[in-house]
Amino acid sequence: MTAQPPQLPLTPPLHGPTAASASLAQVHRTPHRRTKRDSKYIANPVKMFDHIVMHPIGWPDEALQWMGVPRRLPTTPPSTTTELPQGVMSAALRQTYQRIGDTLKRGQKVPREDLSNLVVEAFASIAETQDVFIYRRAKAYLTLGEMLVRMEPMHGFSGSGIAPVLAYLDEPFRSAQRAKLMCWRGSHVVPKQARQADERIDVMDLAMLLAYAQEHKRWGISPDADGNHITRIMYPNETGDVMTVLTVATPAETLQGIQDGHDTLKRIKYSRQTVEVLGSAEEGGWQCSPLLQLVWTLVDEASRLAAKAPTPRWPIGPWAWTTHF
């Protein structure tokens, strides 16, 4: 039997404007308003990810569109805080901070090792001042459908090891992770480097932020008053005088929808901040550093999140990841 070719729909004839066509145009305007009203929901992208059998750091750029990431992230001004207390600066933190200040005064780029050490030492010193345990090797497991992968940033900071609040990385770290993935897949193609100066979010950052939000849910941390789990990722610019902070508010409804396989998910909200490393520190001293003030706020937030989590059945510390998973 000869197969029949598929029948294409007939093209409607072109007529002049009539009353019937006018009423038809009014009918077609209604779905547009409904789409605009329902824009806070997107189709569940997990079905698309099921067809991408690779680590999230190797996802294509289309993944940003599937997750509902805007083309340009809205930029929000950083929140200002009061001056830090005198006992915050440890000897190691003060030495790194002064070395970065001297480098910027000479008009040179700050080495990435100094910036990384500054963030790590700032968390350690401020956590000691606030009497909070901050674990700086916080990893997370990203679960999308049947895919389960471990996401590990350059430095991950969490309260008591169960409440991740910030992931720190930079462009060389992203490039090294992608090169490692290419080598594991047997490919010798040079991976595309992340564009840190761009306002768009990187795919690796997206996966890391979502994994941190799932980590909140996994440990039983309740969302905020708006029903969202707040996670952040931070990286320096090329000069090293400004840190970019990407903040993501993931609704608890979205995390549950990913777990249960819902057809639609509530949109995740993305925002971007630029935080100066020194700021007006030349006039007001290190107490006025926007970066150190941000770390002070994050340490306090990590302490509150860890206090809201149920008492874990597993020990908390560097061994917790092998015990819990």
Image: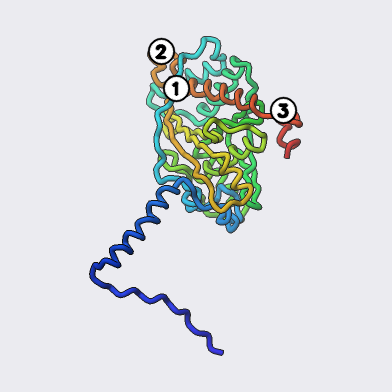
Answer with mark 1 or mark 3, whichever residue precedes in sequence. Answer: 1
Residue 251, located in which quarter of the rendered image?
A: top right
Q: Are marks 2 and 1 in contact (CB under 8 Å)?
A: no
Distance, label 2 to label 1, CA atoms, is: 11 Å
Q: Is residue 309 visible?
A: yes
Label ID, residue 87 = none
Q: What SS does tag 2 mark?
A: helix
Distance, label 1 to label 3, CA atoms, is: 34 Å
Classify residue 290 as left or right of residue 49: left
Percent across and percent down for residue 186 are 61, 56
**Residue situated in front as seen by the camera: 232 or 119:** 232
Q: Nearer the viewer, mark 3 or mark 2?
A: 3
Q: Which residue is mark 1?
A: 290
Identity of the residue furthest to the top in this view? 86
Q: Which residue is mark 3?
A: 311
Q: Is residue 231 visible?
A: no
Looking at the image, residue 1 lies above or below residue 281:
below
Residue 18, located in which quarter of the rendered image?
A: bottom left
Would you call the spot at circle 2 few (<14 residues within 10 Å), some (14-19), or many (20 or more)? few
**Residue situated in front as seen by the camera: 134 or 255:** 255
Q: What SS does tag 3 mark?
A: loop
Q: Nearer the viewer, mark 1 or mark 3?
A: 3
